[in-house]
Image (cartoon, rainbow, N blue to C red):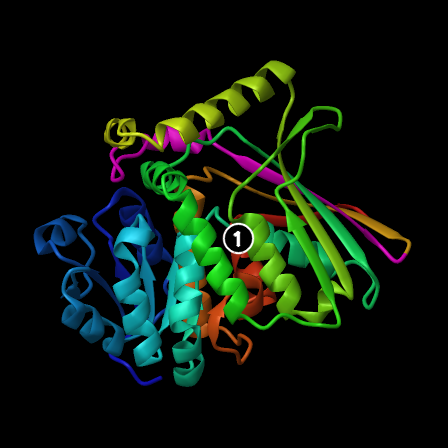
């Protein structure tokens, strides 16, 4: 696409947006034409990057249309996406502009599929959600694992997540918003299942795991990640005729497992009542930890894969998941779509379908490790 800019980052004045802008400033290749966009020019100028600054506002569809028409790829950190994300998705789908975001909100992803997948297919746009810690380590980690197992046979993969990182303010806001919209989320899921065409000759099962003891405690992980993995498995024949995935959060002590379960339950209850406004007010979506704290944070996702008589253990690991590595994942996703040899597909896609191995290679070079521990 002949556009004025290769990449435009929307929402750079927020905490994760600023980290993404900082990463892009160091990572863009020579000759890359990139820009920052937002509604407050002074905040964009304060970031100190010598790049064009564009006006764009989620409440001004014309500004978003102009933004999309100027860019080959738009990356956005402006959430919760169910409140603020649709106008930009619509603008990019209409303009044939590739789009990446950080959403982990199932309702938003499902509604965008129903409304704009067809439009994006017709214009050639790749609409790729969940390009941060939700859900790149799992989506691409499973792809990396599957690639090392026999083809054409039933496959089973289990993922176990460990981390000492803190969820970002934006993630907390999105999680509380999602928990307060259970009915709407279920409705959106039903509409998507009615609209999408699933393969008839293959079976895919993907769930948030269950409580189990595996040398430590593995807890169910009811995030969007297993849904994203399932969509990749339905779209790619490499996952075999019968594919199953289970995802868990792993901790060492039973007391920690019980505390996490109680905290998740309390959060779900508070999200349903007026207390959710107080809850959201406790954490600013634009706030985040100091660099020293981020430097001490880490994540590891271990995958156990088996099929056709073979077994493999792989791992995806990196630094601070909620901020630093999430900014890196989003930026590298945008760079991958802009400059790499990626599959010729369009519509609403997962990272495994839209980019696959080129993005794995990019992230590995950038310090997010994809390794095989045992084969």
Q: Measured from the top left, where is residue 280 in percent x and y?
A: 27, 32
Q: Please state if 263 lies on the left or on the right of 199 as rendered.
A: left
Q: Is residue 300 magenta?
A: yes
Q: Dividing the picture into quarters, in which one does residue 152 lie? A: bottom right
Q: Which residue is mark 1?
A: 136
Q: Measured from the top left, where is residue 257 in percent x and y?
A: 59, 21
Q: Please name whichever residue, 321 or 223, is drawn nearer the observer in this view of the structure.
A: 223
Q: Measured from the top left, where is residue 189 in percent x and y?
A: 49, 56
| Residue sitting farthest toward the top | 255
Q: Please name whichever residue, 290 or 129, is drawn nearer the observer in this view of the structure.
A: 129
Q: What residue appears at the point 43 percent right and 50 percent down from the top-left corner?
A: 185
Q: Please state if 273 lies on the left or on the right of 246 as rendered.
A: left
Q: Which residues are magenta?
A: 284-308
Q: Measured from the top left, where is residue 18 in percent x and y?
A: 27, 48
Vertical placement of residue 209 versus 369, above or below = above
Say if residue 6 shows up in the picture: no
Say if residue 20 shows up in the picture: yes
Q: Please name whichever residue, 125 or 268, is drawn nearer the observer in this view of the structure.
A: 268
Q: What residue appears at the point 69 percent right and 50 percent down from the top-left corner?
A: 245
Q: Is residue 139 magenta?
A: no
Vertical placement of residue 356 versus 288, above or below = below
């Amino acid at each position: 696409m002949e556009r004025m800019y290769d990449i435009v980052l929307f929402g750079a004045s927020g905490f994760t947006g600023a980290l993404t802008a900082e990463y892009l400033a160091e990572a863009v290749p020579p000759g890359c034409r990139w820009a920052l966009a937002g509604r407050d020019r002074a905040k964009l100028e304060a970031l100190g990057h010598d790049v064009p600054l564009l006006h764009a506002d989620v409440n001004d569809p014309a500004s978003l249309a102009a933004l999309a028409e100027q860019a080959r790829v738009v990356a956005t950190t402006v959430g919760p996406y169910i409140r603020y994300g649709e106008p930009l998705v619509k603008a990019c789908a209409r303009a044939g502009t590739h789009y990446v975001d950080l959403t982990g909100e199932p309702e938003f992803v499902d509604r965008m599929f129903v409304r704009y997948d067809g439009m994006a297919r017709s214009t050639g746009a790749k609409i790729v959600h969940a390009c941060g810690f939700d859900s790149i380590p799992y989506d691409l980690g499973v792809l990396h694992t599957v690639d090392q197992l026999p083809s054409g046979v039933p496959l089973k993969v289990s993922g176990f997540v460990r981390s000492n990182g803190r969820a970002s303010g934006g993630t907390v806001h999105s999680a509380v918003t999602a928990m307060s919209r259970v009915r709407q989320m279920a409705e959106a899921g039903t509409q998507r299942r009615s609209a999408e065409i699933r393969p008839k000759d293959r079976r895919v099962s993907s769930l948030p795991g269950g409580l189990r003891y595996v040398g430590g405690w593995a807890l169910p992980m009811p995030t969007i990640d297993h849904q994203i993995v399932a969509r990749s498995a339905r779209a790619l024949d490499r996952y075999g005729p019968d594919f199953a995935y289970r995802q868990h959060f792993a901790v060492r002590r039973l007391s920690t497992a019980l505390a996490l379960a109680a905290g998740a339950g309390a959060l779900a209850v508070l999200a349903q009542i007026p207390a959710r406004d107080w809850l959201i007010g406790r954490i600013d979506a634009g706030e985040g930890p100091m660099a020293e704290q981020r430097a001490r944070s880490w994540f590891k996702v271990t995958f156990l894969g088996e099929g056709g008589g073979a077994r493999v253990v792989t791992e995806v690991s990196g630094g601070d998941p909620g901020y630093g590595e999430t900014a890196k994942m989003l930026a590298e996703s945008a760079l991958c779509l802009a400059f790499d040899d990626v599959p010729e597909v369009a519509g609403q896609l997962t990272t495994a379908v839209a980019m696959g191995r080129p993005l794995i290679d990019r992230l590995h070079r950038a310090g997010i490790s994809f390794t095989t521990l045992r084969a």
